[in-house]
Image (cartoon, rainbow, N blue to C red):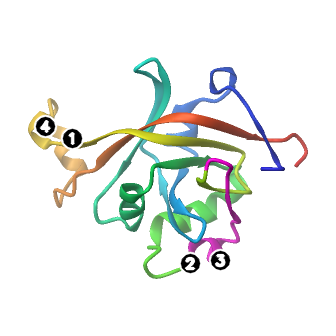
């Protein structure tokens, strides 16, 4: 945590549409001794139940799913553009087959709350799971959404309370 400061997420100059949808993020769950991370471009942030929250989506066949299920929370890490190749790698390789941190040069660290994040990140949201929900195609109001699920591998949504937000110190 020495390269980061704790910040109030409500005071961030951060655009989640840009950060999540265009720059991507890493969703990470587990303990430093055993964790997995995956790249995501679906998710969101806001206020729910009078709490600052993040929500993330993970398909059941992803290796990260088992870690998200067994962990009390997850992290969302955002990076500078120079890490695009690392994020692309983490989104196209399974942690069942490769050590993503070793292959990409990203440095996993464990925060004071026990959640794993990456030392190279610019911004980190540490989230305690509050709610899960399986996407149910019976509730799709727009039939075009079915196109996102050609093999019917519907995501599980995780809503997490933001318990800590870390921002890289200037010049670090």
Percent across and percent down for residue 104 are: 65, 71
Q: Quadrant of residue 64?
A: bottom left
The numbered dot on residue 104 is none
The numbered dot on residue 99 is 2
Q: Residues within 10 Å of mark 4 (few under 14, many from 20)?
A: few
* Inter-mark Cα distance, 4 to 1: 5 Å
* Inter-mark Cα distance, 2 to 4: 38 Å
First in sequence: mark 4 vs mark 3? 3
Provide the residue designation for mark 4: 143
Mark 2 and mark 3 residues within 8 Å of each other at the beta carbon: yes
Mark 4 and mark 1 residues within 8 Å of each other at the beta carbon: yes
Percent across and percent down for residue 128 are: 48, 41
The numbered dot on residue 102 is 3
Residue at (8%, 38%) from the top-left corner? 138
For marks 1 and 3, give the one nearer the viewer: 3
Residue 11 is left or right of residue 24, and the answer is right
């Amino acid at each position: 945590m020495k390269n980061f400061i704790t910040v109030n997420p409500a005071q961030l100059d951060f655009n989640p549409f840009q950060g999540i949808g265009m720059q991507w993020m890493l969703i990470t769950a587990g303990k430093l001794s055993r964790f997995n991370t995956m790249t995501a471009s679906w998710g969101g942030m806001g206020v729910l139940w009078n709490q600052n929250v993040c929500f993330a989506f993970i398909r059941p066949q992803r290796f990260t799913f088992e870690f998200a299920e067994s962990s009390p929370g997850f992290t969302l890490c955002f990076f500078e553009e120079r890490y695009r190749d690392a994020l692309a790698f983490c989104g196209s390789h399974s942690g069942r087959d490769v050590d993503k941190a070793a292959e990409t040069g990203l440095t996993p660290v464990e925060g004071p709350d026990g959640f794993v994040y990456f030392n190279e990140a610019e911004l980190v949201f540490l989230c305690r799971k509050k709610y899960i929900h399986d996407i149910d195609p019976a509730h799709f109001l727009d039939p075009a959404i079915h196109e996102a699920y050609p093999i019917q591998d519907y995501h599980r949504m995780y809503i997490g309370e933001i318990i800590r937000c870390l921002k890289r110190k200037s010049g670090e």
